[in-house]
Image (tube, grey):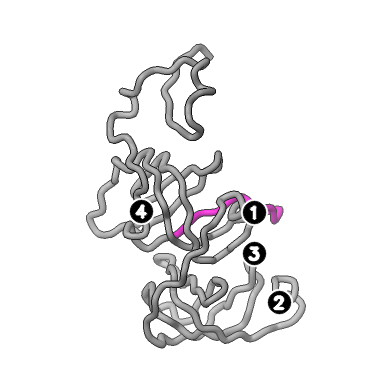
Amino acid sequence: ALGNAGVRQTQYWAKVQGVVTFMIPRTHWIFIHDDNAGMVVTFADQQFRPEVGQVIEAEGRLQPGGYTPYIARGQARVLGRAEMPRPKIADPARLAVGEDYARYVVVRGHVRDLGLGNGYLTLLVSANLRRFPVQVIASKGERLPRHWLDAEVEITGVCQSTKGASGHPLGFLIYTPSTNRVKILAVGSASDLWERPLRRISELPAVPKGARVKIAGVV
């Protein structure tokens, strides 16, 4: 496969088709996915606003991206609609080091925090001692689903891996277009978090990994 190194050495023109899996609001960045992988496409025509689930044909010059090349300032047209691609069952530990960048994936974890603002419902999800944000497009009048706290969830969306200035992986986030792609596997606790029973520190080794607890002590 053509990687960032090859794109840096030679100018390539690409033409691709894929299903739109996510469009970052207020930008001209779109994620598309074909039968095998995902990629980012940016568009010269910033009025072009395809919908999730539409099939587009895009062409333009390849540029080096964060992890894989992307089409920069491309031209595109909508060809129709298609079923969403089958999401890959992803391991958050592998996503955190750049695997499956721009791919349509499904991940599981527990909601540890949540907030609403800037057009997103943002969830902080933990899985296997790793935490990552999930950004869900907020619908008009969306309310904070406080009952999701500590719920076990399955999220289907697009992986956006991030790098630091040195080029080393920093982690990842998941974009998803609606709460319809957040499936509750096990309900959380809707009670006031501070009303939970106080635990002794000596009891913590017996607490299930990832469970929320309340403790007190002297610093």
Secondary structure of residue under mark 1: loop
Disc 4 marks which residue?
Answer: 183
Q: Residue at the location (31% across, 23% down)?
A: 195
Disc 3 marks which residue?
Answer: 67
x, y percentage for residue 75?
50, 85
Disc 1 marks which residue?
Answer: 97
With respect to residue 60, does 111 lie above or below?
above
Give the mark, 2 or 1, whose residue is nearer the N terminus: 2
Q: CA distance from mark 2 to mark 1?
A: 21 Å
Q: Residue at the location (56% across, 72% down)?
A: 37
Q: Residue at the location (34% across, 38% down)?
A: 188
> Which tag is nearer the camera, tag 4 or tag 3?
4
Q: Amino acid at mark 4?
A: Lys
Secondary structure of residue under mark 4: strand
> Which tag is nearer the camera, tag 1 or tag 4?
4
> Which tag is nearer the camera, tag 4 or tag 2?
4
State whether the magenta stretch is mostly helix, strand or loop: strand
Tell me if label 4 and label 3 are in contact, CB under 8 Å. no
Q: Which residues are magenta?
A: 165-175
x, y percentage for residue 116?
34, 48
Give the mark, 1 or 4, whose residue is nearer the N terminus: 1
> Which tag is nearer the camera, tag 2 or tag 1?
1
